[in-house]
């Protein structure tokens, strides 16, 4: 089975990280605070601007380099699975090395 490093899967991982961090907050304010904390942490770790992190949370981050940086900060490296995120065509392909 090949892992999925798509923008939608990144969105799912980011929300899961926020849920796990917050201890399953039920109110909307707690959920927003948890997502903000995860976003701030990722911005600090990756050096990416807040707008890029926000696009990742929305599942709309198309830039492959930014997605790879966020995946790496989450501890999942596409290259470990022989996957190169290809920005121009927005598809995943196997590394040819």
Image: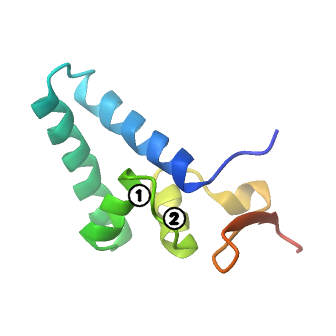
- Identify the mark nearer the N-term, 2 or 1: 1
Residue in the picture at 71% in, 45% down: 3
* Category of crowding for the residue at label 1, using alpha-carbon neighbours closer than 10 angstroms: few (below 14), some (14–19), many (at least 20): many
Residue in the picture at 25% in, 67% down: 50
Residue 15, image quadrant: top left
Height in image: 48 above or below 14? Answer: below
Q: Residue furthest left?
A: 29
Kind of element beneath mark 1: helix
- Circles 2 and 1, Cβ within 8 Å, touching? The answer is yes
Counting from the top left corner in percent of width and height, residue 19 is at 32, 30
Q: On the picture, is 68 further left or further right than 83?
A: left
Task: Select label 2 or label 1 by which is in front.
Answer: 1
* Category of crowding for the residue at label 2, using alpha-carbon neighbours closer than 10 angstroms: few (below 14), some (14–19), many (at least 20): many
Q: Residue furthest right?
A: 96
User: Which residue is at the front of the view, 82 or 32?
Assistant: 32
Q: On the picture, is 79 further left or further right than 49?
A: right
Height in image: 57 above or below 66? Answer: above
Counting from the top left corner in percent of width and height, residue 52 is at 35, 68
Q: On the picture, is 36 further left or further right than 77?
A: left
Height in image: 56 above or below 96? Answer: above
Kind of element beneath mark 2: helix
User: Which quadrant: the N terminus?
Assistant: top right
Residue in the picture at 58% in, 51% down: 76
Residue 16, image quadrant: top left
Task: Tell me the tag on residue 56.
Answer: 1
Q: CA distance from mark 2 to mark 1?
A: 8 Å
Task: Tell me the tag on residue 67.
Answer: 2
């Amino acid at each position: 089975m090949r892992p999925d490093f798509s923008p939608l899967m990144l969105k799912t991982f980011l929300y899961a990280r926020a849920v796990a961090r917050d201890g399953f907050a039920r109110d909307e304010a707690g959920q927003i605070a948890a997502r903000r904390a995860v976003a701030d942490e990722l911005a600090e770790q990756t050096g990416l601007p807040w707008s890029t992190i926000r696009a990742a949370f929305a599942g709309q981050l198309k830039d492959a380099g930014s997605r790879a940086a966020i995946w790496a900060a989450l501890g999942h490296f596409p290259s470990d699975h022989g996957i190169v995120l290809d920005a121009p065509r927005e598809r995943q392909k196997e590394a040819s090395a």
